[in-house]
Image (spheres, grey):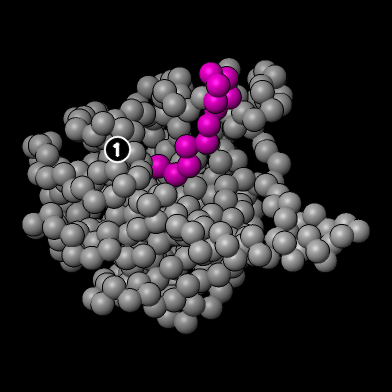
Amino acid sequence: MRCGRCGTVNPAEARFCMACGAPLRRGRRIWPLVLMLGALGGLILGMGLLASLLMGLGPRSAYGVAFSPDGRLVAAGDGDRPVISWGAVILWDVETGRRVRTLIGHTDRVLSVAFSPDGRLLASGSEDDTVILWDAKTGRRVRTLKGHTDDVNSVAFSPDGRLLASGSWDGTMILWDVQTGGRVRTIEMKEIVLGVAFSPNGQVLASLPWDERMFLWDVETGRLRRTLGPPTPTPPPPGWAIQGRAIYKPSAFGAAFSPDGRLLALWSGDNAVILWDVETGRRVRALEGHTGPVRSVAFSPDGRLLASGSEDSTVILWDVQTGKQVRTLRGHTDDVWSVAFSPDGRLLASSGSADGTVILWDVQTGKQVRTLK
């Protein structure tokens, strides 16, 4: 596969260029048991539906997680539905742990979810290259936002709820008008976008590529304000290569602004979390304690704690002021893909990928409140 940026010929299975790191366009995945309709189309279709049913009985994969603004619901992306409705969003009641609703509409894994500030809408980003806006109360699909040409890794609402940002493997971020579904602006980052986050005042949009850099964009103009981290791309971390050649798709990673907007937390490209001063661009400190790459970060509503989820299957709570570990939360049996604090800061939700669970933790004690499946 030839790179459109530098012309380097890469292995067919490569996800982005080994020379310059630019994302490589891919073909859409095909599910042969469902789509291969020929002379024996009816028979093959029947086999596909049977396979779908059997797979739906297996373990789910839980990806992005989010609390509703009133703290009553938890939403998580799902990745092991039947083939005919592969990607789903699951909603649970926080108080009872009961599954409230399953939102069906995506045709591939759902990697990221976010509630609008007023709680009326839920956005989901998927490997089917789309974003869906849902009515959070009824579960009705409001609209599907199409514009990306590859997996949508991350979605985020602006603080006023008027804009939605989506970041994709295609190297772009799109700002959408939530009311109309129209595209306000496309920002060509020309590198994979693993995470997006709005500043608390809504004036800055942060985007996270595959290394330890962070780009800060002016929401009004779409212009780059600042780059945090190394000025040039760094080599991908260990474990992202297939047979030492092609780059493996890491999926979504997170970044988060502190509630006062002064700090930005993101992964460091390895096992640490880096805190940056947004105003000065200065690196404040590195939080080291995980034994695997960090996939997600979240500040508590009061800004005193930072939670980080890692491929080491743990969540660590950090004291933001001192950088010290407060406690380590153990309960997942696979990568922790996403973490989110409840609006009152009393609970923390974490989602594990292949273990198919969302765990609710008591922030004060570190104990498991319940496991959502």
Which of the two residues, 143 or 78, is positioned nearer the viewer here? 78
Res. 312 visible in picture? yes
**With respect to residue 112, does 190 lie above or below?**
above
Name the quadrant of the C terminus: bottom left
Residue 137, position as x, y percentages in the image? 42, 80
Q: Which residue is mark 1?
A: 312
The residue drawn where x is 69% and y is 28% is: 12
Q: Residues within 10 Å of mark 1 (few under 14, many from 20)?
A: some
Outermost right residue:
39
The residue drawn where x is 61% and y is 54% is: 128
The residue drawn where x is 31% and y is 33% is: 292
Q: Main secondary structure of the magenta part?
A: loop
The region drawn magenta spans 242-255
Q: Is residue 18 left or right of residue 228?
A: right
Indicate the quadrant where residue 112 lies. Answer: bottom left
Q: Is residue 327 magenta?
A: no
Q: Is residue 144 left or right of residue 155?
A: right
Residue 178, position as x, y percentages in the image? 51, 66
Q: In the image, what residue type sits under mark 1?
A: Asp
Residue 155, position as x, y percentages in the image? 46, 54
The residue drawn where x is 67% and y is 47% is: 29
Q: Is residue 253 magenta?
A: yes
- Report the number of numbered marks: 1
